[in-house]
Structures are given as C-alpha cells and as structure tokens.
Amino acid sequence: MNIVLLSGGSGERLWPLSNDIRSKQFIKIFKRKDGDYESMVQRVYHQIRKVDENAMITIAAPKTQVSAIHNQLGENIDISIEPCRRDTFPAIVLAVAYLRDMLKVNAEESVIICPVDPYVDERYFETLKELGKQAETGEANLVLMGIEPTYPSEKYGYILTEARKDISKVSMFKEKPDKETAETYIGQGALWNGGVFACKIKYILDKAHELIDFTDYQDLLYRYETLPKISFDYAVVEKEKEIQVLRFTGEWKDLGTWNTLTEAMEEECIGEVVINDKCSNVHVINELDIPIMAIGLHDVVISASPQGVLISDKEQSSYIKPFVDRIDRKVMFAEKSWGSFRVIDIGAESLTIKVTLNPGHRMNYHSHKNRNEVWVAISGKGCTIVDGMEQEIQAGDVLTMEAGCRHTVIADTELQLIEVQLGKEISIHDKQKFPLEL
C-alpha cells in the first residue's frame, strides 16, 4: 500500500517535552520489549511494516522536523518536505505529487492519508489496507475511515452515515458538538472523523489543479509559500458527493494532551524518579540528570526536560497552551540527523551545549563569522577536520576554533562533546556550510 503520514504539530500541549522542533510524535515514552523506548512515529512506522513490509511510506513534514525523522527512522525514509506550514490541503497535494513525480507511483493507484501519531493496535493498519483496496474499486471518489465512538466526545467531528454497515455512504459531516448533541449523533450510528482517508492519486491531483496553478512536484514546491492556507476537509472532503466511510471498531486514541498521553503509558515513571506509596494516578517523565521525588500526590503529571518543568493536575493539563505561549520558547533540546544537542547554560556572551553524535555520523562542514568555539570531548572516539586538517579526537581532548575557520567532527563510536560558543552575537543563523570530500 501507498501511505502518507502527516507529521505536523507545534507541541505546545505536551510542553516541556515538546517544542517547535520536537513535536509530540518524537517523544520516546513507549517501552519496547528490549527495554528501550520509542516514539509515536517509530511505533506507527514499525506497526505498518509488520502489517505490510513492502508498504511505500512517505512522511509529509515541515523542514524543521526532517532531522528528527532521520534520527529516529534512518536516512532512507521518504519525506515530502514542506518549506513552510500551509495547512493540510497543500501538504497532502505536495506529498501526492512527490509520490507521482519523484517516486514514480502510478496515478491510478490508491493512496492512504493518515496522521503520523495515533495510538492504535495492528487492526488499525489492517483496516488501512482495506481502505486502500476500497478506494481502488472506484465505487466512490473518497473513502474515509470512521472510528466507532467510545464516548460522546466534544473534541472530534462526526460522520453521519446512510446505513450502519461496515461500508456506507456518507450523509453529512458535523463539526465538534456539545456532549448532548454528540450523544444524539452516536445514537444515530455516527462515527468519529479521525482525518484518515484513501483515494486514487489522480483524484487529489485533479482537485489540486482546480485550485492551484502548477505543473508538477518541483513547480509546486517552488511556489509552496504562496499557496492558500486551507484544510483538506474544507477544500475537498466537505464538497465531495461520491464519498464512503469504512467503519473501524478497534483501539484508537488521540494522544494530544498530557491526560490522554499518560493513559497510554505502560509505567508510571520514566527517568530518575522516586514516588511513595501514598501517590495515586501520578505519572512522571524526567529527562533531566537530577532526580524527581513525588510524595502523596493524586491525579498529577510531572514532566521535566531542558525546556522546563511542568507540575499539573491531569484534568487541567489540557489547558496549558495559553501559558506556554507566554514563555520564551528557545529550543533547549533537539534531535538532528547526526545525533542530538542539549543546551546546558546561556550566558551574556556564551552558550554551552552538550552534543551527542551517533556512530558514523558527522556535522556539516561549516564556519561561523561572529563566534569562537571550544570543544571538549567527554566520551567516545572520532576525528575532527579544521580548515582541511584532520585530527583524531577522544575523551579529554580540547579543540579551539576561531571565528571564520571551517570545521566538523566525525564520530567513530558514539561521541559526546561539550561545545562552548563565545561571542557577542551568538545566533543559529551565523553558519555557512561548505562541501567536504572524505
């Protein structure tokens, strides 16, 4: 099957673990059988591969997420990179054009579009396969997945059907209702709209040409910043007459808040945490190198990262967004394609960072105009290249780079460095990249 995973989100509702670069789908909280943790995007990717090892998976993501995707899924994953955020219609059109023009997928084939971060079991992906097959029959232009409601939610839109069958025509869509109205819809057999659908590639491109003047993927990419901000639901789904819905009755959760996220956690604590036996319904996630102790708490979530510390009643945790908006959200932690970095200290004319490079990876060969840098290796082995001169590096070595010199570091094993940036104008934009022949 051809599947496009939509990866968006600003991560504000799961602060402080998420930020502008590290959205919720990249937070590693799901324990694997080997004891390590994986993120939502890793979990979904592996679930798809288990159901269909030959599935063509493409992730539609803003350019700020590309490094994190490569870090967690490897370099060979196909990504439709959005130069900026323009809502779901432009993102889906760009991804489908990428399938046809870059991956050479036949436009008569079906494509499945779904979010990258649902908490689901394998039946969900079996249903996705059925969704794609139903789209290929041509009985309808669009086939949606409708999720059997488990309670009268006020957070989701509803799909009203013509019949209570596994596959039915859609009679109408309803926006997020109040609880009483939601109960009425459920009594009529309505389904949650989880933003999952399938159709033929040609259908999306034809709809796109009705609203956008473009020739192919490269042309669309070039003019992407000028495209209207519009959702796929508003641009296409709500206007389509030939539309069906496939009923899904398995496990499905939208882990968009701390309350729902902790419900899916297999253990109460992650990281260095101590809680006493008087605590109940308490979850703690600690990414810091200092311990957290919780005593006698009830219905509380505690989360600590370099970005900040959250202590919240679980029910009230859904309302943190306006408070997060007040905070200076300088990115303090990020995953890159080569590893990760964590800001340790910010001074008036200095910035201290702990850098971790994965084995076999390297930074870009680059220089800075307005700052000097000092690197201290604290573990691992590798080599540095400074103005073309190569030098081995291991724990205890110290290197100084003056402003203007070209430099990079290459990891043989996992390599950790303390990087101290010194200067009056320290900026992420003060970086010039250069080619490097190894």
Image (tube, rainbow, N blue to C red):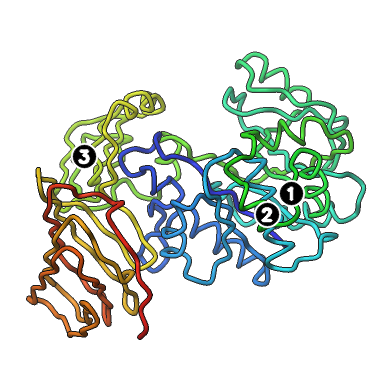
Q: Position of residue 86 (x, y in %)?
A: 58, 39
**250 or 346: which is nearer to us?**
346
Q: Residues within 10 Å of mark 3 (few under 14, many from 20)?
A: few
Of the numbered discs in the image, which one, if any, rests on residue 214? 1
Disc on the earlier residue, 3 or 2: 2
How many angstroms separate mark 3 from mark 1 (CA)? 62 Å
Q: Residue at x 35, y 78 (%)?
A: 436
Q: Position of residue 349 (x, y in %)?
A: 10, 47
Percent position of residue 33, x then y: 42, 66
Which quadrant of the structure image shows residue 154?
A: top right
Q: CA distance from mark 1 to mark 2?
A: 6 Å
Number of residues whose C-alpha sits closer than 10 Å to that of mark 2, classed few (under 14), some (14–19) or many (20 or more): few
For numbered disc 3, what is the local secondary structure? loop
Q: Separation of disc 3 and disc 2 at Cα?
A: 61 Å
Relative to residue 26, is residue 142 depicted above or below? above
The mark nearer the N terminus, 1 or 2, is: 1
Left or right: 131, with 9 as reference point: right
The numbered dot on residue 277 is 3
Label 1 crowd (10 A; few <14 / some 14-19 / many >=20): some
* Three-letter residue code for mark 1: Phe
Residue toward you, 262 or 308: 308
Question: What residue lies at 51% left-to-right and 49% top-to-bottom?
Answer: 62
Q: Residue at x 61, y 34 (%)?
A: 229
Query: Picture quarter containing residue 248?
Result: top right
Callouts 1 and 2 close, C-beta under 8 Å: yes
Q: Nearer the viewer, mark 3 or mark 1?
A: 1
Q: Which numbered marker is on residue 219?
A: 2
Above or below 367: residue 181: above
- Horizontal and vertical percent position of residue 262: 40, 41
